[in-house]
Image (tube, helix red, strand yellow):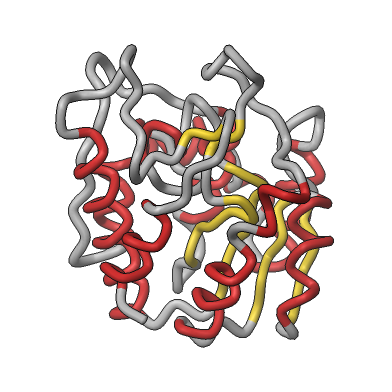
Amino acid sequence: MTPTAFVNALSKLKLDNVFNPYADKCPVHDRSDAVSARRCNLRGYLNAAVEIGVDTIWMGRDLGYRGGRRTGLALTDEYHLSEMTQRYPGSNFKQATVGPALAERTASEIWSVLRAVDLPPLLWNVFPFHPHEPGNPFTNRKFTARELQQVDVLNEMLIKWLKVRRVVAIGQDAFNYASRFGVEVVAIRHPSYGGIKDFRNGMSALYDIPIEVLNPKRQASLF
């Protein structure tokens, strides 16, 4: 498996009411080269992950319309693209949309922890695309069991290829899913829907980070 082969495999999947950022172009927000930019983003990210020896995945549920739908990167919004280049040396990330870079609340919480860990993880999702409500592409919904079946093999290939030893599951859906891969799985509450405090406490305990450090606004001012 190579980054190029993996991205090509992702780009071939087509599902109803699912935006595939590696194949689909948003007629409202995307630049003309958005699809190739997002493919390049993911290829560079995977290459960097291999080079630095990533052995842990932080796994969310799926891409959101303000974050990964636009960047092609899990748990990462456009606001953090330049910072991502510094955390994953050798990569070079490009904004694929027109207008100012958008920020996403979940991504801000994720990155407040990511800045504080020594060896960064691979950020990934159970379902690596953006599922949305029919007729409304700028909404978020949970993937279906049928949709998830389409990516099982690719997720397993990714975990084996990177020799992942631990999955930090961000939310219950990720925890339920990750247990099938035969690696250590740690459950952390998702920061959305009132879970910010539990998310920060869980990550603080897991990585031995002082809780007062895990504040996105505080860290951004120090960065």
Q: Is residue 52 left or right of residue 177?
A: left
Identify the residue shown where x is 56% and y is 74%: 56
Q: Relative to the observer, which residue lies in front, 84 or 26?
A: 26
Task: Report which quarter residue 195 is drawn in.
Answer: top right
Which x, y percent locates residue 121? 50, 67
Q: Relative to the observer, which residue lies in front, 106 or 172?
A: 172
> Height in image: 112 above or below 8?
above
Image quarter in which the N terminus is found: bottom left
Which x, y percent locates residue 112? 52, 45
Q: Relative to the observer, which residue lies in front, 202 or 31?
A: 31
Q: Relative to the observer, which residue lies in front, 141 or 18?
A: 18
Identify the residue shown where x is 74% and y is 81%: 184
Identify the residue shown where x is 18% and y is 66%: 90
Which x, y percent locates residue 117? 50, 65
Which x, y percent locates residue 192? 73, 32
Task: Report which quarter residue 86 is drawn in.
Answer: bottom left
Q: Is residue 1 left or right of residue 74?
A: left
> Height in image: 216 above or below 135?
below
Image quarter in which the C terminus is found: top left
